[in-house]
Amino acid sequence: MRHGNKVNHLGKKTGHRKAMLSNMACSLIEHKRITTTLAKAKTLRVFVEPILTKSKTDSTHSRRVVFSYLQNKDIVSELFRDIAPKIAERNGGYTRIIRTGHRLGDNAEMCLIELVDFNELYSHDESKKTTRRSRRGGSKKTDVVQNSEVSTEETTTEEVVQDAVEETTAEEVVQDAVIVEETDTVNEVTEVEVSPETEITTSDSTESSEASEESSEEEKKEE
């Protein structure tokens, strides 16, 4: 009988049991979660959590102690490089066991054992909680904030449109002023060019009219 004996031998001899737990710990460190039976998961938790605590102090002695349990250089380097900085602020409780039902065939109780800090679904970031909602008028405040944002967006669009209209009107005024100046200059040039010709033509017409009058008077005298 196993009264007071907390070690679960899992129906295996000592060498087989140690090798199995070492391989399971390496798989857990590499994949961050594994699926196994509930009895093996509970035994693995007791085996791997002291190793994770040992990895917090990155020294040659700690690496050699961890290597004596895991017997894998790559897993040891990944443990000290990736996992240890993430669990540095956690005081124990590095793993989580989630029961998934019973296995077909022998009806063994199955579970999922994973590292707590590498599960994004169950991790809660307190820094993201910026506001506290209450039952009294919480939705009204959010509606007011949303309406204010919409109104600010509308005002900004109206200001942009007004600025564009003012710019276009200013450009049109400038263009009209340029056109008026050009027409004034053209009129002045035409006046300057046409005035001597008109004077010559008017003098010619007056001289011809005076000659015709004199000829008509002479004809009357001869008669």
Image (spheres, rainbow, N blue to C red):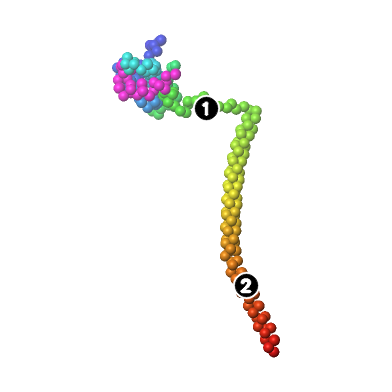
| Dot in front, 2 or 1 | 2
Q: Main secondary structure of the magenta part?
A: helix
Q: Which quadrant, please, contains the N terminus? A: top left
Q: Which quadrant, please, contains the C terminus? A: bottom right
Q: Which residues are magenta?
A: 64-90
Q: Position of residue 34 (x, y in %)?
A: 39, 26
Could you tell me how far apart the alpha carbons at marks 2 and 1 are, in whole angstroms? 99 Å
Would you place residue 50 above or below residue 183 in this image?
above
Tags 2 and 1 in contact by the CB under 8 Å rule?
no
Residue in view at x 38 percent, y 14 percent: 7
Residue in view at x 46 percent, y 28 percent: 120
Label 2: few (<14), some or many (≥20) within 10 Å?
A: few
Residue 203: assigned label = 2
Label 1: which secondary element: helix
Q: Which residue is mark 1?
A: 128
200 and 68: which is toward the camera: 200
Q: Is residue 41 magenta?
A: no
Give, as a three-letter code, the residue at label 1: Lys
Residue 45's image quarter? top left
Residue in view at x 59 percent, y 67 percent: 196
Q: Is residue 65 magenta?
A: yes
Which of pointers 2 and 1 lies earlier in the amino acid sequence? 1
58 and 4: which is toward the camera: 58
Label 1: few (<14), some or many (≥20) within 10 Å?
A: few
95 and 170: which is toward the camera: 170
